[in-house]
Image (tube, coloured by chain):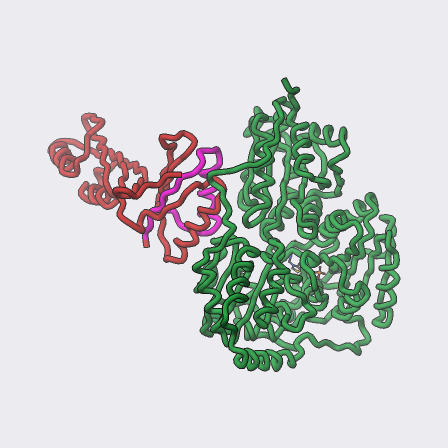
Amino acid sequence: MSTELTGAEITVRCLQKEGVDYVFGYPGGAVLYIYDELFKQDKVKHILVRHEQAALHAADGYARSGNKVGVALVTSGPGVTNAVTGIATAYMDSIPLVVISGQVPTPAIGLDAFQEVDTVGITRPCVKHNFLVKDVDELANTIKKAFYIASTGRPGPVLVDIPKDVSQQKAHFAYPEKISMRSYNPVTKGHSGQIKKAAQLILGARRPMIYTGGGVILSDAAAKLGDLVRTLGFPCTNTLMGLGGYPATDRQFVGMLGMHGTYEANMAMQHCDVLIAIGARFDDRVIGNPKHFYNEDRKIIHIDIDPSSISKRVKVDVPIVGSIPDVLEALLKLLKTGKDSPDHSALDAWWAQIDSWRARDCLKYDRASAIIKPQRVIETLYKVTKGAAFITSDVGQHQMWAAQFYKFDQPRRWINSGGLGTMGFGLPAAMGVQFANPKGTVACVTGEASIQMCIQELSTCKQYGLPLKIINLNNRYMGMVRQWQEFFHGNRYAESYMDALPNFVKLAESYGHVGMKIEQPGDVEGALKEAFKLKDRLVFMDFITDQTENVFPMVPGGKGLSEMILV
Amino acid sequence: MRHIISLLMENEAGALSRVAGLFSSRGYNIESLTVAATEDPTLSRMTLVTAGSDDVIEQITKQLNKLIEVVKVVDLSDGNHIERELMLIKVRAIGNDREEIKRMADIFRGRIIDVTDRSYTIELTGTGAKLDAFIEAMEPSAILETVRTGASGIGRGERILKP
Ligand SMILES: Cc1ncc(C[n+]2csc(CCOP(=O)(O)OP(=O)(O)O)c2C)c(N)n1
């Protein structure tokens, strides 16, 4: 007879079996047995954050950059409610996470016990799936299912709620090697007839456009996408979530599209006759007003793993449900072995049109400014890091400038909260990125408002010696809010001014880090170089930037893609 | 357009709330919803009546399919099917009305399942339209209480919903 293990031991053994190296968490009463078991072993390392939201963002950054399931551990009640923002952030961007939460003992459930919340109920709308484990015999199986569900199909966070008594009770432990669920069978292969139709449409295109999103990154399809784009000679655009899916320095890349996309990307998107959408979902920040999008006639091919993403906001002509690498491979095979090729003269004319849009130079800004321009900081950051850094960001103008001016040539380098738009994401996500890439250069581009939403994590960074570089674009405004107020609310800057800011240099120093304040445009490059030389220190760089700078181009809410406000 | 959607799902705590939650969070409407375990106690069968444009119905079925515990979804309105709903209706029945109400129940193939000297409780099954018609046929002030289950549906002939 094999010996029986407690639920807490089983939990930790499951994590070991899954090859989990880091768990990001915060202890509390309901998870004490689990913490006890973590303490007794050293395979799974626990990273103590300073707020549960950060545990989730760190696990999330770890997953996004490292292509592994991120794991977080939180206690019941407030532990869970603090984690919800992070869970929803991961859910909106389809990030594979397993969240283990403590729950009050089963006999106390429903009695408004101390630190009881209906975790499964609260998180239901923002997880791919969740479980409440009431029987210790089900625990190992449930954790296996959680990893399986989180990482397959369209990925997402899965939560496992473990009541304290279940973590104490004993059961025989056997971790299933494989799992199959009759109710969950994610498709992989695309329909071959549909792929043929797509190939025909592609070959007949005169003004084609390839538009790709986070799905390409999540499914590791960047190499195949590159092959497709180059084989066809078509223009390619990425969404905010898809940056790095196609090399930004390549001529066929027309920039990011959407609300703050480039003029050329948005115009090409609007005026193409065949659109190939891959792992993207036509959301409101990407195509603007769908009615306006319909003003032009075009055929749409849509490749996605999630059938519900297809024809949700925009009707498509050739839906292909399947895993992107598989579908692209099949499509490439057809295109490469067939004797037809796209109409080159039409394509040349289309490129000439795109180049004329490009010549509009929509991302220009005043390079001679006597005040630090935020765009300049990002451009210099790109130069100093040779485009090889992992960049996380918070939410606001700085996020858009980072997306526009840092040219991502590789996937999983650009880490931001695109779907939920969570301020506070950047710093803890960067911690996770650094754990997943211990040798990588990791920078967090943030604003003075966003950084204060998870600033406590400077302490975590100190504890684990994370040499992050924080690029604070300090405009003393919630810049993105101020921009909307300037454009749409008659310059009434209601509550968007950041008053009573801390001295960020001293703040960083008090956490044991290096702080720098940069006020002159001429100092930007030198300061960045100096900071990145400090390989083993976290450097908080407070750039005092132009308060009035706005993000252009901009497609105002409710407007069409070609109705951009330009500089 | 009205649609009647049938689904098989794992008979697990919480599965029902996932379906209900999906409808409320995405703003779909539910006209009725019935659910109970099947002959295989690990599975529940649910019938949902909803209304929406073709696009909305397409999204509803896709979103339902996406729920991890849902095994199969079928839009019964896509083909031949049968729907039935059960109604229990309590009506005031005094004097001459008693005979009249009993006759009406017979016409609708209802059964009187509880009797007092002032009321009848009638059990009636049929399509929703038939139950509506019965209610129409009653004097409004005579209706004391109605309970309806919402529609249950099944495909005709060889149309079978199995895991
Ligand atoms: C948690 C959260 N609260 C509010 C918002 C709304 N919001 C979007 S951008 C923004 C301002 C961000 O200011 P800052 O971090 O200084 O960046 P900037 O836009 O100035 O670059 C706000 C308040 C949000 N995205 N997230």
Q: Position of residue A347 (x, y in %)?
A: 55, 78
Q: In the rendered view, tell whether residue A67 sits above or below residue A11.
A: below
Q: What's the residue at 46%, 69% (across, down)?
A: A201
Which chain does the red colour mark?
B
The image shows residue B118 at horizontal and vertical percentages of 20, 29
Q: Is residue A394 visible?
A: no
Magenta segment range? B2-30
Q: Vertically, is A138 above or below A71?
A: above
Which residue occupies the foreground of this view, A152 or B11? A152
Residue B40 horizontal/vertical position (percent): 39, 30
- Give the quadrant of ligand 1: bottom right
In this view, the residue in front, A368 or B99, is A368
Among the chains, which one is green? A
Image spot of residue B20 (x, y percent): 44, 43
Q: Residue at x 41, y 43 (%)?
A: B72
Left or right: residue A190 compared with residue A496: left
On whether residue B18 falls in the magenta region, the answer is: yes
- Position of A197 with respect to A268 (left or right) is left
Asked if residue A524 lies left or right of residue A220, the reply is: right
Q: Quadrant of residue A84?
A: top right
Quarter of the picture holding the N terminus of chain A:
top right
Q: Is residue A370 visible?
A: yes
Vertical order, A359 against A12 (above or below): below
State the residue in front, B139 or A434: A434
Which residue shows up at 46% across the image and 56% down it? A191
